[in-house]
Image (cartoon, helix red, strand yellow):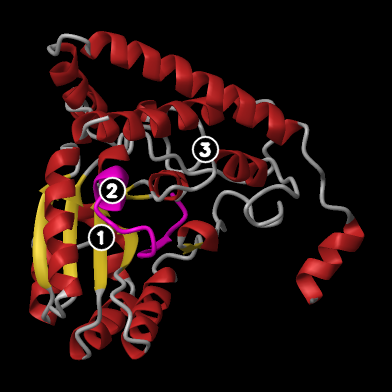
Amino acid sequence: MNEIRKLYRDMLRIRMVEEAIAERYREQEMRCPIHLSIGQEGVAVGVCSALAGDDGVFSNHRAHAHYLAKGGNLKAMLAEIYGMEEGCCRGIGGSMHMIDPAVDFLGAVPIVGATIPLAVGAAWAARLQGLQRVIAVFFGDGTFEEGVMHESINFAVLHSLPVLFVCENNLYACYTRLSSRQPDRPIHGIAAAHGCQVLTANGNDVEAVFAATTGAVQALRAGGRPVFLECATYRWREHCGPNWDDDLGYRPAGELANWQAHCPIHRLQERLTAEADGAAFIAQAKIEIAAEIDGAIAAAIGGTHPCDQNLAGYLHG
């Protein structure tokens, strides 16, 4: 499979997984909050596709796309969301607390900005151990309103740590628009003032994100300054939950439709359908992914509930 097709399939897989989660969430079997990345798949796939297998990734509350793009196990992720012992955190973490050392997905937590110092610490450890390892950390535009963001960048720049700071700027923190929270200046400009190498990319163009990340990773492995990559993107559904919320009025009229018209998946799909066997590839990918999702959901539903005794053991030992 060539690079373009892989990028497309990875994004499509994430989209179909999250749409399946949204559809089944109303069944009340997933007993944890969910934050979907529908619309933002290009950033996760573009970044993680440029990382090596042993490079580390930290995420936030909107973690599904990052986990899957890093090579995470779909069955383990869905089992975790369903609260089953077969989950990547044995069913006690849920959607916002995933971790999977097997693929160097090093943690996701719901507290805004909480994984950023952890990522810097992991990069510091890699430097001390003499490893050629890059640590990428994903966060939203709202994180730039947290002091720990600036403290962590300062430390990373001071020690030239191999950290890739990835800002998924989707314009909103919950239901409050960026222009109501921050001054009229680019976020990446503040990162540049801190001393980071700064890159920007259209988050709806997975190839652009991939190219920017590839260059950033090469620079970091060569001992360059930490890199701050800001990607413009947009979440389609509500902040927390499976529903559509454009009727609430916190988004300007037509804004959602405009971003949907520039869908990162459709962007590549149009190119693929122009190829001789592109339509057949897309159709087959959808069939294969749908079957994988159905199997993973069935496995999760039929999983093992952590019993009270085991739960106590996990928490205290």
Rendering coords of residue 282 (x, y %) = 31, 16
- Earlier sequence position, callout 1 versus callout 2: 2
- Asked if the stretch drawn in magenta spans residue 237, the answer is no
Q: Which residue is depicted at the point 31% across and 60% down? A: 142
Disc on res. 49: 2
Q: Secondary structure at mark 3?
A: loop
- Earlier sequence position, callout 3 versus callout 1: 1
Label 2 crowd bin: few (<14), some (14–19), many (20+), radius 10 Å: many
Q: Secondary structure at mark 1?
A: strand
Could you tell me how far apart the alpha carbons at marks 1 and 2 are, in whole angstroms?
Answer: 14 Å
Residue marked by disc 3: 241
Foreground: 37 or 124? Answer: 124
Disc on res. 166: 1
Q: Residue furthest right?
A: 309
Left or right: 211 as drawn, with respect to 244: left
Quarter of the figure with the C terminus: bottom right
Residue type, label 2? Ser
Q: Which residue is depicted at the point 26% across and 40% down? A: 42
Tell me if I can see residue 48 in this picture: yes
Relative to 83, residue 314 above or below: below
Instruction: Tell me where the magenta segment starts and ends, as one range.
Output: 43-62
Quarter of the figure with the N terminus: top left
Foreground: 185 or 231? Answer: 231
Residue type, label 1? Val
